[in-house]
Image (cartoon, rainbow, N blue to C red):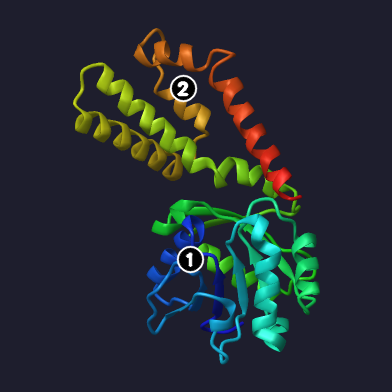
Amino acid sequence: MPSTPSILLAGCGKLGGALLDGWLASPTPPKIVVLDRHRTASDDTLTIASSPAEIPASFTPDIIVLAVKPAGADKTIEDIGKALGSRFKKSALLSVMAGRTCEALASAAAKAGAEIPVLRAMPNTPSAIGAGISGFYAPPNATTEQATLCHELLFAVGDVVRVEKEEDLLAVTAVSGSGPAYVFLLAELLEKAGESHGLSKETARRLARGTIYGAGRMLDDLPDDAEDLRKAVTSPNGTTAAALSVLMAPDAWPANIAKAIDAATKRADELAG
């Protein structure tokens, strides 16, 4: 495995940008070419290519990270294959897109001229501050070196959970890939509720965000199950119990969280095509 890997990042939107920010902040960032027409700056670590034709002729990526919209993946792979030529065969693909399977992406790569392994991951946007978590799948045809390199790229921006079955990434997408949005929604709703009870906007904001941060720290630092932590802070007939009697009603959070994860999982499956 190269000591300083070469990465071609295809797509630099919210998720691709989060990964890029995390890599650039690491002590030993990889050599990166970003394929994105909306980026303009380049430096010694980072080179921008607005189209595949602008990928430097001397650049051979160890890993091509696909962070484009799923519908545009096949065309992106085709264009990269044409631009890299024989260099394409020396790479592996790491998809961080929802839905698209290893088999489908490998087929697109084969049409572009290379039988190369496709690995898949589902990071989330806290990767931008080194606090992400990624579900990761490496197929049998990926080498140990390729799987290790992809794992290290993901680990540079947070924790990594390796799954044994590719289909497990559907649930990963629903739980952790989309999960930050659920937490942001909770913060948003807590802030609004605080304001409705007379708190200033700034006070409600600080209380909501500080509470979520502190609870997250406890979940991360302590070995206790989430259920046990919840019970520990819930005094019988107290204020927390009163709130939870609403949130934990059968038709409230228990049902709706399950429905939300089901909906996200279904949509991830639909995106697989």
Camera-nearest residue between 186 and 223? 186
Q: What element carries label 2?
A: helix
Question: Which residue is farthest bottom?
Answer: 58
Q: What element carries label 1?
A: loop
Residue of label 1: 156
Residue of label 2: 231
Q: In which quarter of the image is the N terminus?
A: bottom right
The answer to which quarter of the image holds residue 90 is bottom right
Alpha-carbon neighbours of circle 1 within 10 Å: few (<14), some, or many (≥20)? many
Position of 37 with respect to 52 (left or right) is left
The residue that appears at 70% across and 48% down in the rendered structure is 271
The residue that appears at 54% across and 12% down in the rendered structure is 249
Query: Which three-letter amino acid code belongs to the residue tagged 1?
Result: Ala
Position of 188 with respect to 78 (left or right) is left
Residue 15: x and y in percent read 50, 57
Q: In this view, does 238 lie above or below 217?
A: above
The residue that appears at 49% across and 59% down in the rendered structure is 13
Residue 136: x and y in percent read 64, 58
Q: In this view, does 93 lie above or below 31?
A: above
Which one is closest to the eye, mark 1 or mark 2?
Answer: 1
Residue 43: x and y in percent read 37, 82
Query: Which three-letter amino acid code belongs to the residue tagged 2?
Result: Lys
Mark drawn on residue 73: none
Q: In this view, does 149 lie above or below 128?
A: below
The residue that appears at 67% across and 62% down in the rendered structure is 73
Q: How far apart in space, not on screen, are marks 1 and 2 (Cα)?
A: 34 Å
